């Protein structure tokens, strides 16, 4: 599990997305279409499901979850959506249920 000792090293969802996009841009691998990203997302969800079904260890499951978040961030970037804003909005919606 992630150790949260140093607050200075904590990042919000938006800054993590920015770092991801910067890295992808530097490697010239930015996504071109939403469809491309959705296909990758479905693939990663399948790999996550397989890791759970096969009883893989925490490290493998964490890697698959990170891959899913990676794809979600790419969709957010393509659509100019703040992952942090939509997450907090969903928290509010669920609070009112």
Image (cartoon, helix red, strand yellow):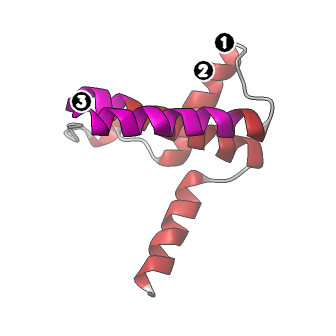
Residue 80: x %, y % from top left: 74, 49
In this picture, residue 64 sits left or right of residue 29: left
Secondary structure category for the residue under label 3: loop
Q: Crowding near pointer 3: few (<14 within 10 Å), some, many (20+)?
A: few
Q: Which residue is mark 3?
A: 56
Asked whether the beta carbons under mark 1 and mark 2 sit within 8 Å of each other, the answer is yes
Secondary structure category for the residue under label 2: helix
Badge nearest the viewer, 3 or 1:
3
Q: Which residue is mark 1?
A: 27
Residue 77: name its quadrant: top right
**Magenta segment boundaries in residue numbering:** 37-63
**Who's the residue at 53% across and 34% down the image?**
70
Alpha carbon distance from label 1 to label 2: 6 Å
- Mark closest to the chain's N terminus, 2 or 3: 2
Is 86 contained in the magenta span? no
Q: Which residue is mark 2?
A: 23
**Who's the residue at 29% across and 39% down the image?**
52
Secondary structure category for the residue under label 1: loop
In the foreground, 56 or 20: 56
Alpha carbon distance from label 3 to label 1: 30 Å
């Amino acid at each position: 599990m992630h150790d949260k000792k140093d607050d200075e090293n904590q990042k919000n969802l938006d800054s993590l997305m920015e770092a991801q996009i910067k890295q992808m841009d530097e490697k010239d691998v930015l996504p071109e279409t939403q469809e491309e990203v959705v296909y990758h997302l479905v693939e990663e969800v399948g790999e996550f499901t397989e890791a759970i079904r096969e009883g893989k260890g925490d490290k493998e499951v964490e890697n698959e979850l990170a891959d899913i978040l990676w794809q979600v961030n790419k969709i957010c970037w393509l659509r100019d959506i703040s992952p942090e804003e939509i997450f907090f909005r969903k928290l509010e919606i669920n609070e009112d249920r």
